[in-house]
Image (cartoon, rainbow, N blue to C red):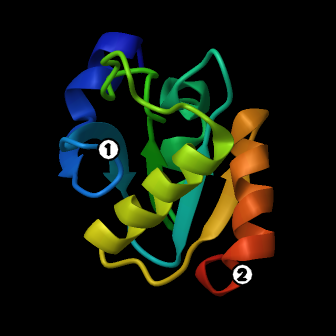
Amino acid sequence: MNHHDFIDRQKHIALDGIAPFPVKIAYTDVGSGPPLLLMHGIPTWSYLYHLVIDRLAKTHRVIAPDFIGHGSSDKRDGLDRSLLAQRDMILAFMDALSLPSATVVGLDTGGGVALIMGVENGDRVS
């Protein structure tokens, strides 16, 4: 799948409570089964996982968001892009999708977010 097709497949959601204004997050959500949340690193975006998303979707609900400031998500100035802010966005994102928990996969900064979630929000990761 080329990046244009990947972008066309992405969905968008506006999250409240993580900035003074709603923050637009782009994401892929395909498949069914146990939720698997894929988090990319910097300077990439969720397209990083494009070769494995459909394969994983055969057995899982695969959800791959673009972090704040990356890919097709909100890039406005003044948005906090720290690991803690990305973790807060992921938790709000999971709430908006009614996901009480998920298996998380993280690369680079996505790994940092996954580790923070594991330590501070262990009930949200499996």
Q: Amino acid at mark 1?
A: Ala
**Residue 31 shows in this picture:** no
Q: Which mark is residue 34?
A: none
In the displayed structure, does residue 80 sit left or right of residue 74? right
Q: Amino acid at mark 2?
A: Gly
Work out whether mark 2 precedes mark 1 in sequence or the reverse, and give the earlier one: 1
Q: Nearer the viewer, residue 38 or 23?
A: 23
Q: Secondary structure at mark 1?
A: loop
- Vertical relation: 78 (above or below) 124: above
At 76% across and 38% down in the image, what residue appears? 107
Q: Residues within 10 Å of mark 1 (few under 14, many from 20)?
A: few
> Residue 54: x percent and y percent?
48, 45
Q: Residues within 10 Å of mark 2 (few under 14, many from 20)?
A: few
At 57% across and 74% down in the image, what residue appears? 102
At 62% across and 36% down in the image, what residue appears? 82
Q: Nearer the viewer, residue 48 or 32?
A: 48
Q: Which mark is residue 122?
A: 2
Instruction: Name the residue beneath numbered marker 1.
Output: 19
Q: Nearer the viewer, residue 24 or 33?
A: 24
In the displayed structure, does residue 120 sit left or right of residue 28? right
> Residue 108: x percent and y percent?
79, 33
At 78% across and 46% down in the image, what residue appears? 112
Quarter of the image that includes the C terminus: bottom right
> Residue 125: x percent and y percent?
66, 76
- Vertical relation: 109 (above or below) 104: above
